Image (cartoon, rainbow, N blue to C red):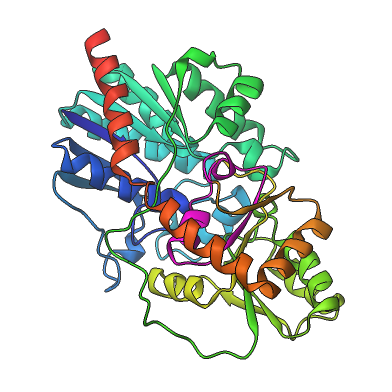
């Protein structure tokens, strides 16, 4: 079986869960004999950078399209990025012009490749998938990792993005949602029939990083970790508000904020305004090794997302034996038992749960150990097999 896959994030060009999911899923698909051509936007100014070696494995072939597109980019961020490019004229003048340019280039690749099914990840690739389907008359799968409603929290929705998402889901032969939480949102807000949607939960990769019992970091304070993009969707402001309440009762606690995003300045200023700037450490964007180190440092991991389609970071924290507190407004909360769950807006309950895990060792140890064993069942071979089932259904139907 041959799959033409469109994505816009792939290691090492990753800034979030989408790249993690794309890489792990393609690797597991490849192990079963599925041949994948992965089409990725790729900036010329990274071409000669030593650190950029696109990761491939087995039956995975990478096809690169010169593009200024980057993961989770807004129109404003695109324009700012364009001004820094050495040859900005080769790119689209706006984010949507660039998405259209990527779509046309992807159509040409579709003409050149032989494949049985098309698999697209999130909105920037949906236009490419529609064009490829029209060109080759092959079944189209749209994989929804996040919606515009998730990214904006339902506020100031970009109508162009929403319209493209809606068009893509309706043109698709099958829609894959990463959780029932996301499936329900697609049904309610995009009017996609329930029977057209297949839920395929994400997983976590145990093949490279096992928990090292001998690993130890000397520290005097307890550590509470937030790791994710600093955007409205991820709820970093609720993390800081909860930190203030925790520190009113327990002084020997440090709060680490790892990530970047458009709320970064606001969060830094808010920590100062609340008088906890010396207790909140901003780590910026972390590479994969530093991410693993951050999890291992953490006594508690907090995912306070406003709207999280899945939440791979919670599984990664559990894999590294960091007890997790996750938002009830998330996909991951529907599949894991051994974590604490809270409404993202309830900072009183969030702070109480943080204190409980920090101060009551039996609770901390029980949750840590049970979560570690629970997360082992989230193997990427399972979602890969579910994707293959979808492919086969569509191919045989055709």
Q: Residue at x 55, y 46 (%)?
A: 337
Question: Residue 309 at x, y = what percent?
Answer: 56, 40
Whether 174 is among the magenta residues is no
Q: Nearer the viewer, residue 225 or 334?
A: 334
Image position of 54 (left or right of 155): left
Picture residue at 72% right of the left edge, 85% below the top: 252
Residue extending farthest front: 362
- Which region is colored magenta? 310-336
- Residue 87 at x, y percent in the picture: 40, 60
Question: Foreground residue, 43 or 119?
Answer: 119
Q: Residue at x 22, y 11 (%)?
A: 396
Query: Considering only vertical position in the picture, is 147 above or below 346?
Result: above
**Is 6 situated left or right of 370 in this image?**
left
User: Which of the image's four quarters has the C terminus?
Assistant: top left
386 to the left or right of 327: left
**Which quarter shows the N terminus?**
top left
Coordinates of residue 369 in the picture (x, y in percent): 48, 63
């Amino acid at each position: 079986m041959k799959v033409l896959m469109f994505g816009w994030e792939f290691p090492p060009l990753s800034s979030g869960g989408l790249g993690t999911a794309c890489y792990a899923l393609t690797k597991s698909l490849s192990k079963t004999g599925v041949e994948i051509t992965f089409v990725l936007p790729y900036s010329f100014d990274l071409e000669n950078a030593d650190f950029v070696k696109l990761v491939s494995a087995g039956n995975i072939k990478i096809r690169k399209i010169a593009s200024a597109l980057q993961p989770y980019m807004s129109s404003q961020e695109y324009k700012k990025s364009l001004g820094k490019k050495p040859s900005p004229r080769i790119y689209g003048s706006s984010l949507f012009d660039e998405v259209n340019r990527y779509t046309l280039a992807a159509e040409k690749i579709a003409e050149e490749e032989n494949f049985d099914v098309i698999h697209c990840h999130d909105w920037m690739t949906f236009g490419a998938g529609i064009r490829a389907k029209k060109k080759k008359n092959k079944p189209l799968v749209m994989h929804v990792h996040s919606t515009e409603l998730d990214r904006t929290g339902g506020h100031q929705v970009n109508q162009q993005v929403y319209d493209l998402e809606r068009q893509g889901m309706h043109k698709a032969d099958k829609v894959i949602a990463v959780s029932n939480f996301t499936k329900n949102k697609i049904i309610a807000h995009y009017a996609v029939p329930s029977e057209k949607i297949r839920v395929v939960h994400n997983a976590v990769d145990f093949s490279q990083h096992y928990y090292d019992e001998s690993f130890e970091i000397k520290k005097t304070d307890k550590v509470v970790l937030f790791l994710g993009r600093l955007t409205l969707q991820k709820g970093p402001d609720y993390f800081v508000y909860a930190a203030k309440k925790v520190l009113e009762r327990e002084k020997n606690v440090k709060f680490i904020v790892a990530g970047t995003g458009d709320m970064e300045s606001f969060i830094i200023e808010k920590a100062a305004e609340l008088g906890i700037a010396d207790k909140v450490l901003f780590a910026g964007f972390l590479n994969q090794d530093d991410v693993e180190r951050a999890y291992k440092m953490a006594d508690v991991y907090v995912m306070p997302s406003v709207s999280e389609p899945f939440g791979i970071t919670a599984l990664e924290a559990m894999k590294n034996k960091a007890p997790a507190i996750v938002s009830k407004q998330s996909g991951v909360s529907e599949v894991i038992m051994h974590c604490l769950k809270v409404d993202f807006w309830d900072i009183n309950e969030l702070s109480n749960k943080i204190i409980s895990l920090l101060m009551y060792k039996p609770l901390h140890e029980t949750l840590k150990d049970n979560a570690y064993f629970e997360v082992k069942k989230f193997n990427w071979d399972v979602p890969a097999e579910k994707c293959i089932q979808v492919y086969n259904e569509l191919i045989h139907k055709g």
